[in-house]
Image (cartoon, helix red, strand yellow):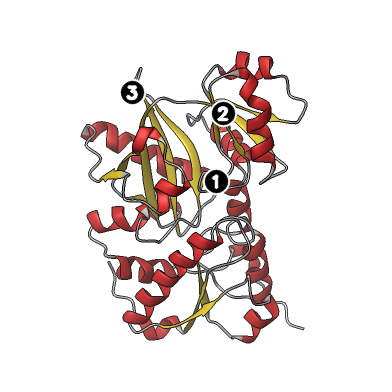
Amino acid sequence: MNTINVQELGKVGVLFGGRSSEREVSIMSGSGVLAALQSLGVDAHAFDPGLRSLAELAGEKFDRVFIALHGRYGEDGSLQGALEQLGIPYTGSGVLASALAMDKAMTKRIWMAEGLATPKFMQLTATSDPAAVVEFLQLPLIVKPAHEGSTMGLTKVTAADQLPAAYALAARFDSAVIAEQFIDGIELTCAILGKDADAVAFPLIRIVAPDANYDYQHKYFTNDTQYFCPAGIPEQQEAEIRAMVVASYRALGCRGWGRADVMVRASDNEPFLLEMNTSPGMTGHSLVPMAAKVAGLDYAQLCLKIVSMAELDLHATSDWKP
C-alpha cells in the first residue's frame, strides 16, 4: 500500500449514528473508525447527523468525511447529495450508486441486465396473491424491505399463508417490499476496495450461523456465528466469485469500498449475488475488517486507506463562481 500522509488528509469528520433503524450499529462502527484514525495521528472528529444538523456539518469545515452511517439518510444517496452540495469529499459510493445499491429491486434489475446471477424476485403489495407469488418463486422464499439492511424486517416464508404477515412486517420498515427466491447453500461475503479498473476483491468469508439464521442478533451481538477466511472453497471457484463481485460493484457504479453478499447453491454449486452494501459495518463483528486482515491490512490501516480515497462525484467539478 502506498504511504499515506495523514497531515494531507486535513480535518476529517467521522459521520456515525444518524436516524436509520441501524443507528446502534452505526455508532459501534463509527466509534471504531474514529479511534483508529486518531491512533494514526489523523485530525478526526465525531459528527452525528442524527443529533446535529447539516448546517452544523458545513460549519465544521471538514476537509473530508468518513461515512460510517448505515441504512437510510447515510447509505442511500441522500447524504451523499448533501455533501456534493457542500463540496465535502466523502468515502464510499456517489449519489447514484448509493441510491441504486440501497434499492434491492433496482440492484437486481441492473445485475440481471448485466447477465449477473441473482435470485428471482417480485415486488409485493398488500394485495399480492400468495398463490401467485409461491408459484413464481417456489417455497421457501424470502420477504424483505427493499431499502433496509442488517436483515431488518426479513422473513423466511415456508408456507403461502405466512406471506401476509411477512409482508406486514417488512412494510413496517419500508413502503417497498420484495419477495425473493430462497437459495439454499453456502453463505459468503466479499469486500471490495477501490474503483473502476483498480477495484479489487478481498478474500471471501464463509458464514456459518446457528440454524443458518444470520439475523441482526447473530450479525452484531453474539459470538455464536462462525466465520471462515479463507472460506475453504476451491481456489478456482473463489477466483470466479471474486471476479463476479467486482463486476457487480462496477455495474452499479460503486467506488471506494463495499461488500457484496453471495449464496452458493448446494444443488449445483452456482453462485448468486444477494445485495451490495456501500457503507459496510466496521464493528468488532464486521466482515470487511476481517477480510482485510487476511489480505494484510489491519483495521486502522484499512480505515486510513478508505478515508484517503474520499472524493466527490466527477460531475460535481465546476468552474462556476458566485
Mark earlier in primary sequence (3, 1): 1
> Nearer the observer, disc 3 or disc 2?
2
Residue drawn at 28 percent across, 45 percent down: 227
Residue annotated with mark 2: 180
Q: Is residue 116 above or below residue 68?
A: above
Mark earlier in primary sequence (3, 2): 2
Residue drawn at 54 percent across, 48 percent down: 149
User: Callout 1: helix, strand or loop?
Assistant: helix
Q: Where is residue 140 in the image (x, y as percent from the top left)?
A: 51, 21
Mark 2 to mark 1: distance in Å? Answer: 20 Å
> Nearer the observer, disc 2 or disc 1?
2
| Residue 144, picture quadrant | top right
Question: Which label sits on residue 252?
Answer: 1
Quarter the C terminus occupies: bottom right
Quarter the N terminus occupies: bottom left
Query: What is the three-letter code of the residue carrying label 1?
Result: Leu
User: Callout 3: helix, strand or loop?
Assistant: loop
Q: Is residue 252 above or below residue 138?
A: below
Residue annotated with mark 3: 269
Query: What is the three-letter code of the residue carrying label 2?
Result: Glu
Q: Position of residue 61 (x, y in %)?
A: 59, 86
